[in-house]
Image (spheres, rainbow, N blue to C red):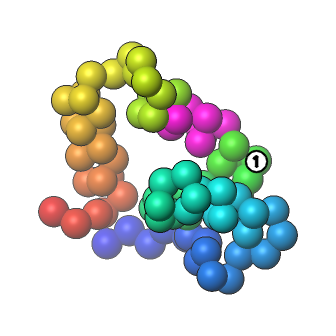
C-alpha cells in the first residue's frame, strides 16, 4: 500500500484551515485529492486548478466515462482500494 502524506482537516492551521473550510462548504466534505494537494500548496494550487478544469467544470473536455477511467488508473497507481 502506498503511503501518501495528507493533511488532516481537523489539524489544519492558517491558510489551509480556510481552504478546508471552503472545500467542505463547496463539496459537503473534504475530498481526498484536496487532502493530498494541501500538503504542498506550491504544487497543490496548479494541480488543483488542473483537477477542477478536467473534472469539475460544466463543460469538461473529458466524458464521464473518461473521468471514471482516469480515476481508476490513478487509484491503482496510489495503491487505493480494489
Left or right of 17? Residue 14 is right
Whole-percent x, y for residue 1 in the image:
31, 72
Count the marks: how many?
Answer: 1
Q: What is the chief secondary structure element of the magenta stretch?
A: helix
Task: Please give the residue where the numbered disc 1 appears in the rendered image.
Answer: 42
Q: Nearer the viewer, residue 76 or 50?
A: 50
Image quadrant in which the C terminus is located: bottom left
- Please, which residue is most extreme toward the left here? 82
For the residue carrying disc 1, how many other residues have a C-alpha within 10 Å: few (<14), some (14-19), or many (20+)? few
Instruction: Please determine whether, in this image, residue 50 is positioned above or below residue 73.
Output: above
Q: Secondary structure at mark 1?
A: helix
What residue range appears in magenta? 46-52
Determine if residue 51 is in view.
Answer: yes
- Please, which residue is most extreme toward the bottom here? 11
Q: Nearer the viewer, residue 15 or 69?
A: 15
Name the residue: 56% across, 70% down.
6
Instruction: Please determine whether, in this image, residue 69 is positioned above or below residue 53.
Output: below
Left or right of 29? Residue 71 is left
Which image quadrant for residue 20?
A: bottom right
Whole-percent x, y for residue 48 in the image:
59, 42
Whole-percent x, y for residue 14 in the image:
83, 70
Determine if residue 38 is in view.
Answer: no
Name the residue: 50% across, 37% down.
51
Is residue 49 rendered magenta in the image?
Answer: yes
Whole-percent x, y for residue 8 in the image:
59, 77
Name the residue: 75% across, 63% down.
18
Which image quadrant for residue 66?
A: top left
Is residue 42 rendered magenta in the image?
Answer: no
Amino acid at each position: 500500500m502506498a503511503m501518501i502524506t495528507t493533511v488532516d482537516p481537523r489539524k489544519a492551521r492558517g491558510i489551509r484551515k480556510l481552504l478546508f473550510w471552503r472545500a467542505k462548504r463547496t463539496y459537503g466534505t473534504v475530498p481526498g485529492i484536496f487532502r493530498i494537494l494541501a500538503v504542498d500548496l506550491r504544487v497543490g494550487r496548479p494541480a488543483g486548478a488542473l483537477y477542477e478544469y478536467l473534472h469539475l467544470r460544466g463543460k469538461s473536455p473529458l466524458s464521464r466515462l473518461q473521468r471514471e477511467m482516469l480515476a481508476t488508473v490513478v487509484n491503482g497507481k496510489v495503491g487505493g482500494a480494489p
